[in-house]
Image (tube, rainbow, N blue to C red):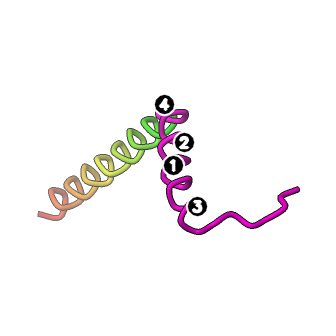
Amino acid sequence: MQSELPKPHNNESYRAFEFSEFIQENWVYLGIVLIMIYIVVMYAKILRDRKKNRDN
């Protein structure tokens, strides 16, 4: 158990390090999520274009 609370000025730099460490360890999963988002957006655009063409 901690004997004292962490100091706020130390905590900020730790959070930045923790975030960069998270990115480094999980870049594959983040890349997969970004690719999936891209596919969904492009599919929605294709469906919208098809609907416009069908109405005209």
In the rendering, at what x and y percent does residue 53 appear?
A: 15, 56
Residue linked to disc 2: 22
Q: Earlier in the sequence, mark 3 or mark 4?
A: 3
Q: Which residues are magenta?
A: 1-27
**Quarter of the figure with the C terminus:** bottom left
Query: Residue sitting at 56 percent across and 47 percent down?
Result: 18
Residue behind mark 3: 11
Give SS at disc 3.
helix
Kind of residue at badge 1: Phe
Give the amino acid at mark 2: Phe
Mark closest to the chain's N terminus, 2 or 3: 3
Closer to the chain start, of discs 1 and 3, is: 3
Secondary element under disc 2, as helix, strand or loop, is: helix
- The reply to whether the C-beta atoms of the residues labelled 2 and 1 are less than 8 Å apart is yes
Q: Distance between the Cα atoms at labels 2 and 4?
A: 11 Å
Q: Which residue is mark 1?
A: 19
The residue shown at (38%, 38%) is 35
Q: Secondary structure at mark 1?
A: helix
Q: Residues within 10 Å of mark 2 (few under 14, many from 20)?
A: few
Gap between marks 1 and 4, in whole Å? 15 Å
Q: Of the residues shown, which amino acid type is indicated by label 4?
A: Val
Mark 4, secondary structure of its residue: helix
Give me the residue at 32% from left, 47% from top: 43
* x then y, percent, for residue 26: 53, 36
Q: Residue furthest right?
A: 1
Residue 25's place in the image compared with 22, above or below, is above
Q: Amino acid at mark 3?
A: Asn
Q: CA distance from mark 2 to mark 3?
A: 16 Å
